[in-house]
Image (spheres, grey):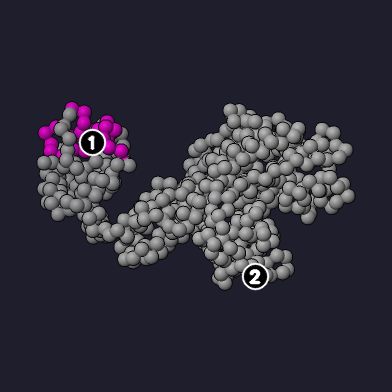
Amino acid sequence: MATCSRPLFVSASAASSASPSLASLRRLHTVAIVSIWEPCPPLRAASCCFAQTRHCCRRSIKCLASGPSVSRLTWPIKRMLSRYSSLMIVLHSNINRCYQAMSALHQDGTSRHFLSAGFSRVVLGVVLVMSISAASYTTPSSSALTEENLLFLEAWRAVDRAYYDKSFNGQSWFRYRENALRNEPMNTREETYAAIKKMLSTLDDPFTRFLEPEKLKSLRSGTQGALTGVGLSISYPMAINGSPSGVAVMTATPGGPAEKAGILPGDIILAIDNRSTEDMDIYDAAERLQGPEGSSVDLSIRSGANTRHVVLMRQTVTLNPVRSRMCEIPGAKDSSKVGYIKLTTFNQNAAESVREAIKTLRDNNVKSFVLDLRNNSGGLFPEGIQIAKIWMDKGVIVYICDSQGVRDIYEADGADTIAASEPLVVLVNKGTASASEILAGALKDNKRAVVYGEPTYGKGKIQSVFGLSDGSGLAVTVARYETPAHTDIDKVGVMPDRPLPAPFPPDEDGFCSCLRDSTAPCNLNAAQLFAKS
């Protein structure tokens, strides 16, 4: 069977010429090194550059247009390499016949000299490329892969499909896989986990991370409304008070072991069971705080300038993400009753809990609302979108972007709105992160709310969780987001409209006291609280 060279790029002049000139032959020399060799199709009148009587042809633009795209070349190249030895024999035979056919068409000596020298260099180049490729391609076949290799490949594929930056931090992701399969030890599950973590570290993305089976179980339980632990929500390091080390307490669940022990938002956990948290991953810390019901955990806590040890007994804690109350302000007219809603996390109950709180406050004749997102480190992205729709009847909520730009837009259409007209204030701080920032940014940019506080944490990326076959998983950054004003808040945060007085109480009781007492340092003028200018 004859073979033909199908170039990746062919000029129109070379394709349309019935008898190639020396210039077109030079173009052939240029593209041959990036061609693949495959059986010639049945010759048609307009399909080839040369006469139909020749056994070797070069496809025209028309012929190329009907063939496979460049993106589908990987499989033919691998097939070519697998048949390397027999292909060389066929290649040698057909090059000789092509050379003889071309020589018959060109009797001027110059062309003959070009073919004998130039084309031979092309063949040598192709042979060298094929030789190098065949020698370096030593990845084990699928039948030779171990269970540990397959687990590694499963993790690699999850990142390959979903990671938002298709440059993979400027590296060849496929080449990394091949090198890792050849060079990384994967004889035990621990070694495979280490190889996966090493692979993810090359992305230089702290939010794309590996989750051992217990960590994955812990993460999922934390978004489902209940978990067994001490009732603490913790933040990324340095999220609160600029702490140089340790893990910061975001909130303590009402009635939970931590709250009963007097642990407050802003406290710093310095050690868990005598292990320092200075370099501890935030998710590792969360796992260590959880455990079997009735077991104990020893915490070293810094509150302000004081450090103390606290032993807490773990228990099943129901995570009600919302606390609310009505604040009555003596002397105020339109704003005499303010509904305060504290949203602590975005678990699967969050949107419905906010909806119920609004209805309850309305039953008490509340005419305006305060949504407190301080120290809310986020959670489920869809819940943040649903809560934005509660407060907005129209407008963009968030733009989801990847390396190519905007790929999706979430908008409010009025279908889920129940509180789009009442005056609204949103409170934020450095502990407001992720889904909380999406919500705050949407309400601010659509001028639905006045935002008070300080710049938020600045987590402008979105993760999805992928389970692996052995019960472990990956949290992979799948996108970044921009606020409705196309602001990328990553590492910057949402900028508030106005500051809060310092110090300002973190809970509902303190908030109401500040509104009532006009002489208190934390007082906010109720008449101006909701003013948008």
Q: Does the magenta stretch include residue 51?
A: yes
Left or right relative to 64: residue 177: right
Kind of element beneath mark 2: strand
Q: What stretch is highlighted in magenta?
A: 45-70
Distance Cα–Cα, label 1 vs label 2: 79 Å
Q: Is residue 418 visible?
A: yes
In the rendered image, residue 44, in percent from the top left (x then y), is placed at 17, 29
Query: What residue is shown with label 1?
Result: 59
User: Main SS type for the magenta part?
Assistant: loop
Closer to us: 395 or 467: 467
Q: Is residue 29 visible?
A: no
Query: What residue is shown with label 2?
Result: 309
Residue at 23% from the left image edge and 58% from the top image edge: 144
In the rendered image, residue 67, in percent from the top left (x then y), is placed at 26, 35
Where 92 sits versus 44, above or below?
below
Residue at 72% from the left image edge and 50% from the top image edge: 507
In which quadrant of the rendered image does the N terminus lie? top left
Q: Does the magenta stretch include residue 514?
A: no
Callout 1, which amino acid? Arg
Left or right relative to 223: residue 173: left
Residue at 61% from the left image edge and 46% from the top image edge: 321
Kind of element beneath mark 1: loop
Indicate which label's residue lies in the foreground, 1 or 2.
2
Where 124 sits versus 72, above or below?
below
Callout 2, which amino acid? His
Residue at the far bottom in the pictured view: 274
In the rendered image, residue 263, in percent from the top left (x then y), is placed at 67, 61
